[in-house]
Image: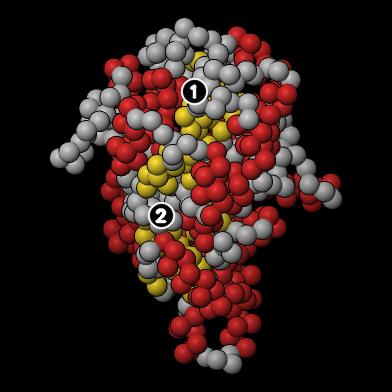
């Protein structure tokens, strides 16, 4: 598409077919996102392979998906496009998105194939004929070896999250897969970061690759604000609680470095009354599915996760990503922070660090080309004020069922008529906040800069603070969703199971398939098929 004026073009002008336009119109895609502006016309019209530097959330699935779907010959019931992704969750996500886009194209079938689920059903679906296969490398190789997937008609190969695939050691598998695909294929590779190895793959497997960059190389998502808090290492958890208490509507992912730390932080948050859950590799697939589903459905407000386990989790509306300490690898930070501020929304990526992590913070700043804003850990006074006004806000906005509530009003009014209006308000607020007030009473500053100036050798003060923390943990309930009793999370159940049996226990009665498929899943196992 010749766009000499450099004006952004609409989807139609980019050459997207009417059936696809109709579907994406229904999905609310009004204007192409930058990566779509770049990639769609290239794939539709030009020769040569493509390396796209794009974070998740930039719209890359539609960038490669729309042209690929458009190129499929629906009269041929053979795989013509192959999408390779590192995790089963990403596979399902991509296959689901492609199914949504191709809703109005007859006889176009998309099949996600991934490990950990029945290969027989996948074989059956393949035999019935699919044109787009979205696969994890290991399962695809298995199917190739069994002669169940034929790749001789594949004209387009997409490697998504290529840097993740390299991190997971899939390089050899990718080589093996590509050896079964015709030489003349068109190939696209998407990666959130651009390590040297990715350039190596491009050189080795791609023909005249053209590099598209959505944003700067290795840059964090544009609309993400990067903030750091600095505390002593042993105050990190307290800082986390304050940050969360200061954001009553938070919907956030908290990244820890190890499975153990992930479980510990989730356990502590749950014990302290927060609506939290965990996601890490020691959980069974069924438990991980359930944790992800609950988080996606906003049943859980805070998900504590390892980087590996969170790979497949795709959520658009995260308000916060919290780095409980900084990752060793700068690319990992880019991935973490890229999970917020997606689909043109704004997001916040927070790092809770101690002073020795400052140099790594600077390295990250250099790499992402953005500065972290230093913020003081919220003070108890500030948190309480924030929470009280948040409740006042909710009081103003709550829907009132006049007929139902009205019936009880006269009686309740009579009972409380001895209270003045001010007394009444004070009591309502106290009901909600007494525990929070007790927790934060006499709580010292934990911000490192503050505490350094404060009282350097104050062991007494430190000990009494610890005791107070412990005392108040029991007293404090409700957390963010005060008053309601949260359902037992996967983390709680694992913990309970451990305590009961002396070892970790599965999430009883929760098979993986209890996780609801997307609405366009046509009950026919994994096949994603369009519906009219
Ligand atoms: P992706 O990077 O492919 O995971 O896309 C991130 C999110 O942006 C997904 O929820 C898409 O549905 C959404 N999206 C993709 N393209 C557009 C667009 N042109 N307009 C609005 N939303 C979009």
User: Residue placed farthest to the top in the image?
Assistant: 75
Q: Residues within 10 Å of mark 2 (few under 14, many from 20)?
A: some
Q: Position of residue 494 (x, y in %)?
A: 72, 46
User: Residue placed farthest to the right in the image?
Assistant: 502
Q: Which of 153/409 is in front?
A: 153
Disc 2 target residue: 217
Q: Which of 1/30 is in front?
A: 1
The response on whether ligand 1 sits within 8 Å of label 2 is no
Q: Earlier in the sequence, mark 2 or mark 1?
A: 1
The image shows residue 380, relative to residue 6, as above or below, that is below
Instruction: Name which residue lies at 69% across and 29% down.
Output: 141
Is residue 427 at all visible to an observer of this figure? no
Instruction: Name which residue lies at 47% across and 56% down.
Output: 334
Q: Residues within 10 Å of mark 1 (few under 14, many from 20)?
A: many
Is residue 358 at all visible to an observer of this figure? yes
Q: Which of 13/336 is in front?
A: 13
- The C terminus: image quadrant: top left
Disc 1 target residue: 155
| Image quadrant in which you'd find residue 226 | bottom left
* Number of numbered labels in the structure image: 2
**Circle 2: element type:** loop
Q: Position of residue 160 (x, y in %)?
A: 51, 38
Q: CA separation, marks 2 and 1?
A: 28 Å
The image shows residue 281, relative to residue 385, as above or below, that is above
- In this rendering, would 489 be left or right of 58? right
**Circle 1: element type:** loop
- The N terminus: image quadrant: top left
């Amino acid at each position: 598409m010749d766009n000499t004026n450099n004006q952004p073009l609409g989807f139609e002008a980019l050459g997207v077919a009417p059936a696809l336009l109709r579907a994406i119109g229904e999905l609310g895609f009004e204007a192409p996102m930058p990566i779509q502006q770049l990639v769609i016309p290239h794939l539709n019209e030009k020769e040569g392979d493509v390396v796209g530097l794009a974070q998740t959330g930039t719209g890359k699935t539609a960038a490669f998906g729309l042209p690929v779907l458009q190129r499929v010959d629906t009269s041929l019931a053979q795989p013509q496009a192959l999408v390779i992704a590192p995790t089963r969750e990403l596979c399902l996500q991509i296959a689901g998105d492609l199914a949504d886009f191709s809703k109005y194209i007859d006889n176009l079938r998309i099949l996600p194939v991934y490990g950990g689920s029945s290969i027989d059903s996948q074989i059956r679906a393949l035999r019935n004929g699919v044109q787009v296969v979205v696969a994890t490398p290991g399962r695809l190789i298995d199917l190739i070896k069994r002669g169940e997937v034929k790749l001789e008609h594949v004209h387009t190969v997409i490697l998504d999250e290529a840097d993740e695939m390299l991190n997971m050691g899939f390089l050899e598998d990718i080589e093996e897969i590509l050896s079964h695909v015709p030489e003349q294929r068109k190939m696209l590779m998407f990666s959130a970061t651009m390590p040297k190895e990715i350039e190596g793959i491009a050189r080795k497997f791609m023909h005249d690759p053209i590099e598209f960059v959505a944003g700067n190389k290795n840059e964090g998502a544009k609309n993400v604000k990067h903030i750091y808090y600095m505390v002593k290492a042993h105050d990190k958890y307290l800082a986390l609680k304050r940050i969360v208490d200061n954001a009553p509507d938070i919907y956030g992912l908290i990244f820890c470095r190890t499975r153990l730390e992930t479980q510990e932080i989730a356990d502590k948050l749950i014990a302290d009354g927060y609506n939290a859950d965990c996601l890490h590799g020691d959980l069974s697939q069924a438990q991980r599915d359930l944790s992800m589903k609950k988080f996606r459905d906003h049943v859980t407000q805070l998900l504590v996760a390892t980087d590996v386990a969170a790979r497949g989790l795709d959520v658009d509306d995260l308000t916060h990503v919290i780095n409980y300490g900084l990752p060793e690898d700068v690319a990992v930070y880019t991935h973490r922070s890229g999970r917020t501020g997606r689909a043109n929304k704004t997001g916040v990526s927070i790092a809770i660090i101690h002073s020795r992590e400052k140099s790594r913070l600077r390295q990250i700043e250099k790499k992402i080309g953005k500065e972290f804003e230093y913020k003081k850990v919220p003070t108890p006074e500030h948190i309480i004020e924030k929470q009280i006004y948040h409740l006042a806000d909710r009081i103003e906005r709550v829907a009132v069922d006049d007929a139902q509530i009205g019936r009880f009003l006269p009686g309740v009014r009579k009972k409380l008529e001895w209270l003045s209006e001010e007394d009444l308000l004070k009591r309502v607020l106290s009901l909600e906040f007494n525990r929070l007030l007790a927790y934060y009473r006499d709580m010292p500053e934990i911000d490192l800069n503050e505490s350094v100036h404060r009282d350097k050798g104050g062991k007494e003060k430190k000990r009494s603070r610890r005791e107070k923390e412990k005392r108040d943990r029991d007293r404090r309930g409700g957390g963010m969703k005060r008053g309601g009793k949260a359902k037992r999370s996967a983390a709680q159940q694992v913990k309970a199971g451990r305590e009961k049996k002396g070892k970790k226990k599965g999430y009883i009665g929760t098979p993986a398939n209890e996780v609801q498929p997307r609405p366009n899943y046509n009950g026919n196992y994994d096949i994603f098929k369009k519906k009219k």
